Image (cartoon, helix red, strand yellow):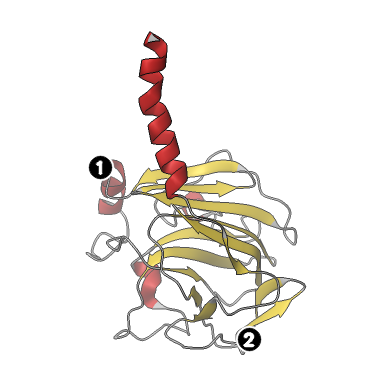
Amino acid sequence: MKNFKYLIPSLIVLVGYVGNSQEWEVLFDGENTDNFRGYKIEAFPTHAWEVVDGAISTLTDVENIDIVTQGMYTNFELVFEWKVSKAGNSGVFYHLQEIYNQEPGNGNSPNWLNDFEFQILDDIDFYDKDPMRSAGSLYDLIAPTNKTLRPVGEYNTAKLLVKDGHAEHWVNGTKVVEYLIGGAKLNSILANSKFKDNPDYGKSSSGHIMFQHHGQKVWYRNIKIRRL
């Protein structure tokens, strides 16, 4: 009975967490793009992205236009698969707020300076070899650890989890980045980063999820999310 008494609070916490989790929402089923639109655009930018072989893929030699989710998310678990072409570069941004009074650069949103980014990259052939800007990193802030990537042209799995400020990046079933939004460790890293003079970086606790068009070929598929 003594052990049972101490077990009850733990069970309550576990049940409460599960109870707050919602069903999975399919953001992209291999065909329908209705859950996405262009950055600061009402429609899906078919002149910059296409659906091919069950994936959303960038078109090259066009204006770079990022795509954002129709919905906004605070606490969530996002899963998806991704692959890039040789030297390909992209990113998945979260807690993103569209900035309507800023002009995009080369079609891209200006939000890469404001929001957390799960880096998507060909680590082998891309010219920049800094681990803090490699695939799976919290872009330019935290390098991934224990990461294994599949060869270019093959799909990798990814998971992004954010719960009450606790964030995790997963690549191919392994947690590679973990941090606390607003925590002392991250704040110290920010103070010595290129984002240090931007008071808006990471300040939004809720927002869209954005998939970046960086000019190279990237494919995303099996995208789904659940609120936590």
Q: What is the three-letter code of the residue carrying label 1?
A: Ala
Question: In terms of secondary structure, where does tag 1 sit?
Answer: helix
Whether residue 214 sits left or right of residue 208 in the image: it is: right
- Which residue is more in the foreground, 98 or 148? 98
Q: Residues within 10 Å of mark 1 (few under 14, many from 20)?
A: few
User: In 3D space, how far apart are the residues under numbered discs 1 and 2 (Cα atoms)?
Assistant: 42 Å
Whether residue 102 sits left or right of residue 39 in the image: it is: left
Whether residue 188 sits left or right of residue 91 in the image: it is: left
At 57% from the left and 38% from the top, the residue drawn is 146
- Which residue is more in the foreground, 11 or 73? 11
Residue 136 appears in view: no
Question: In terms of secondary structure, where does tag 2 sit?
Answer: loop
Quadrant in the rendering for residue 224: bottom right
Label annotation for residue 184: 1
At 47% from the left and 88% from the top, the residue drawn is 42
- Give the residue furthest to the right: 53
Residue 91 placement (x, y as % from top left): 52, 65
At 42% from the left and 42% from the top, the residue drawn is 17
Label annotation for residue 61: 2
Quadrant in which the N terminus is drawn: top left
